[in-house]
Image (cartoon, helix red, strand yellow):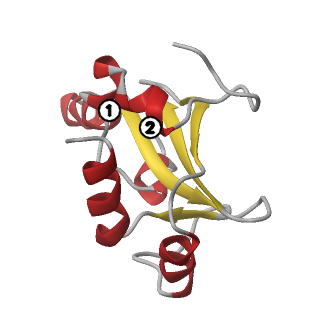
Amino acid sequence: MQKGITGMLGLSDIKSAPDILSAIKWDVTPRILMEPRFKSRPEDVERLKEIVGYMFYIETQCEPPALILMKVGRSDIESTVGRIDEIPPELIKRAIDNPVERPVYGMYTITDEIKEWLKKELNI
């Protein structure tokens, strides 16, 4: 798999990566991601298993705001791996103007509209 000029995967790269597609966590949000991660109780360990994988979110600390794919590990965020430049800008604008939940450190949760667009584009 080849990364683009930015060093990040694009839509076509992600589309052709079954290991990524199968590990996308559609219900993990920036708020969930930023919760403290305790590992002492069995339910905490199970919770970590639920969020490990990949998460889409909207990053507003860049201009213009971007749809980003982040890899999430058991103990922390691992890395930003993708940027989806093909998304219609109005989908991002609507998600920022009418957020699903309060943003965390400039990270916005993707809307159902964006999830539907991504699933269609990724053939999921």
Q: Quadrant of the C terminus?
A: top left
| x and y percentages locating residue 119 in the rendered image | 26, 50
> Nearest the camera: 82 or 35?
82
> Nearest the camera: 47 or 40?
47
Residue 123 vertical position relative to residue 109 in the rendered view, above or below: above
User: Which residue is identified by label 1?
Assistant: 48
Give the residue furthest to the bottom: 98
- In the rendered structure, are the residues bearing label 2 and label 1 in contact, judged by CB atoms less than 8 Å apart? yes
Residue 35 vertical position relative to residue 43 in the rendered view, above or below: below
Per the image, label 1 sits on a secondary structure element best described as: helix
CA–CA distance between discs 2 and 1? 7 Å
Q: What amino acid is found at the position of numbered circle 1 in the picture?
A: Leu
Q: Is residue 57 left or right of residue 3?
A: left
**Residue at left offset 54%, top offset 71%:** 92
User: Which residue is identified by label 2?
Assistant: 37
Q: Is residue 62 left or right of residue 123?
A: right
Q: Residues within 10 Å of mark 1 (few under 14, many from 20)?
A: some
Q: What amino acid is found at the position of numbered circle 2 in the picture?
A: Arg
Residue 119 vertical position relative to residue 24 in the rendered view, above or below: below
